[in-house]
């Protein structure tokens, strides 16, 4: 009988309260939300920089139409 009372007391003592679970889940959601926002921001910045580099690449390729072989007078090849 005493063992049953002790067992029922141990089982009724909550190790983790509902408020503790909500607090931990809130912290986890905020943490991953911040990581998600930073990732989206970084992706946006990289996309913007890629577009800028693509524009620079097209303007450079238009100027380099008159390419001349610089290895023509080299002593190891192109003879």
Image (tube, rainbow, N blue to C red):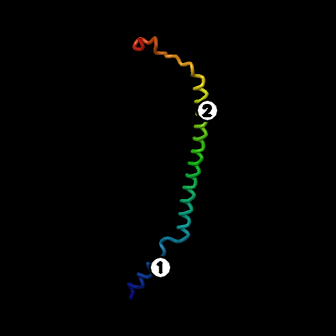
Give the camera-side residue of 49 and 20.
49
Residue bearing the label numbered 1: 12
* Mark 1 vs 2: CB contact within 8 A: no
Q: CA distance from mark 1 to mark 2?
A: 68 Å
Q: For the image shown, how many numbered marks are present on the structure?
A: 2
Q: Looking at the image, which is closer to me, 41 or 26?
A: 41
User: Residue 23's mark?
Assistant: none
Task: Kindly give the residue lying farthest to the front in the view shown.
Answer: 65
- Secondary-structure class at tag 2: helix
Q: Quadrant of the C terminus?
A: top left
Q: Is the N terminus in the top left, top right, bottom left or bottom right quadrant?
A: bottom left
For disc 2, the marked residue is 55
Write the residue at 39% across / 13% down. Answer: 76
Q: Answer left or right for 78 relative to 62.
A: left
Q: Is residue 59 above or below residue 67?
A: below
Identity of the residue drawn at 61% across and 32% down? 55
Task: Tell me the SS state at disc 1.
Answer: helix
Residue 60 to residue 21: above or below: above
- The image shows residue 68 at horizontal and vertical percentages of 52, 16
Label 1: few (<14), some or many (≥20) within 10 Å?
few
Question: Which of the 4 image quadrants contains residue 48?
Answer: top right
Looking at the image, which is closer to me, 68 or 15?
A: 68
Which of labels 1 and 2 is toward the front?
Answer: 2
Whether 13 is drawn above or below 22: the answer is: below
Closer to the chain start, of discs 1 and 2, is: 1
> Quick one: label 2, few (<14), some, or many (20+) residues within 10 Å?
few
x and y percent of residue 57 in the render?
58, 30
Q: Quadrant of residue 11?
A: bottom left
Q: Residue at x 41, y 81 (%)?
A: 7
Q: Position of residue 15 (x, y in %)?
A: 47, 72
């Amino acid at each position: 009988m005493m063992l049953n009372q002790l067992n029922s007391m141990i089982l009724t003592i909550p190790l983790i309260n509902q408020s503790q679970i909500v607090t931990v889940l809130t912290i986890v959601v905020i943490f991953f939300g911040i990581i998600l926002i930073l990732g989206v921001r970084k992706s946006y910045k990289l996309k913007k920089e890629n577009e800028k580099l693509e524009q620079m690449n097209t303007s450079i390729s238009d100027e380099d139409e008159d390419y001349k072989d610089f290895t023509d007078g080299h002593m190891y090849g192109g003879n």
